[in-house]
Amino acid sequence: MDRKIKIVFVLFICVTVVFAALEYQQNQPVKLQGVQVNDYQGKKLTPINSMPKTSIKGTQYINESNYTLEVTGLVQHPRNYTYAEVLNHTAYQKVVTLNCVEGWSATVLWQGVLVSDLLNEAKPLPTGTVVIFTAADNYTTSFPIEYLYNNNILLAYKMNNVTIPPEYGFPFQLVAESKWGYKWIKWVTKIEVSNDTNYTGYWESRGYTNGGNLNQSYLGG
């Protein structure tokens, strides 16, 4: 075999191996950090693996190395955060129960950053009254901006002391306490400040209430 052909062949094999390795690494489950806890301050927690896996397009596998969280819309300073930059904010913990319209619930110790901290850095304009969240699978939902501030809503990256697995929303899930589960958006990639008070998300546009309050029926009408 000609020497030049051999060199080209070897380079081709090397490139193929590198791409295969990158593809393999990208599709591997995210390694969990920490040890899962079963109770917290006297409250019994729901084991992660016992929780149903819900989604509209299946589990989204997000590569931490090229992930970006966009904070945009009616803000003075749009931001693009890496995963590490989000985690560099002050961390908070709280036990909150997720209630799904399918009839199940899960009590979990959530750890994350305050959505309000991220919004404060972007500085919402006075006209920004609604915050729209978008996920990697294009799922969306929205909230009045006051709800996020007044309730110290978390953008969580840990549940029961371990990194949120891909099946449950890695890298970030919104802990929308006092709301039905369809408001608890997973795989969050964008936070947009808007003035569209009539905005309806994925399930809201299919008949679920926009408020999603637990003390009310989730069905509109």
Image: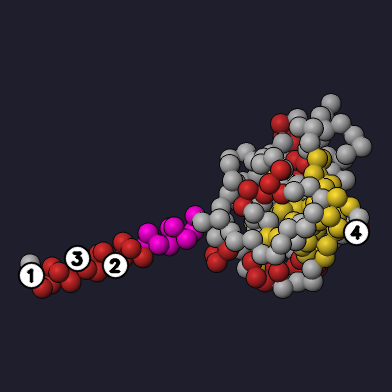
- Reply above or below: 82 against 178: below
Residue 108, horizontal then vertical, whole percent: 80, 51
User: Please, which colouring scheme is shown?
Assistant: secondary structure
For marks 1 and 2, give the CA distance: 19 Å
Residue 96, horizontal then vertical, whole percent: 85, 51
Region rendered in magenta: 19-27
Nearer to us in this view, 210 or 62: 62
Residue depicted at 58% across the width and 49% down the height: 60
N-term mark: 1 or 2: 1
Which of discs 2 and 4 lies nearer the camera? The answer is: 4
Is residue 25 shown in magenta?
Answer: yes
For marks 4 and 1, give the CA distance: 72 Å
Is residue 112 shown in magenta?
Answer: no
Which of discs 4 and 1 lies nearer the camera? The answer is: 4
Which of discs 3 and 4 lies nearer the camera? The answer is: 4
Q: Please, what secondary structure does the residue beneath circle 3 have?
A: helix
N-term mark: 2 or 4: 2
What residue would you read off at disc 4? 41
Residue 14 numbered tag: 2
For marks 3 and 2, give the CA distance: 9 Å
Residue 19, horizontal then vertical, whole percent: 37, 62
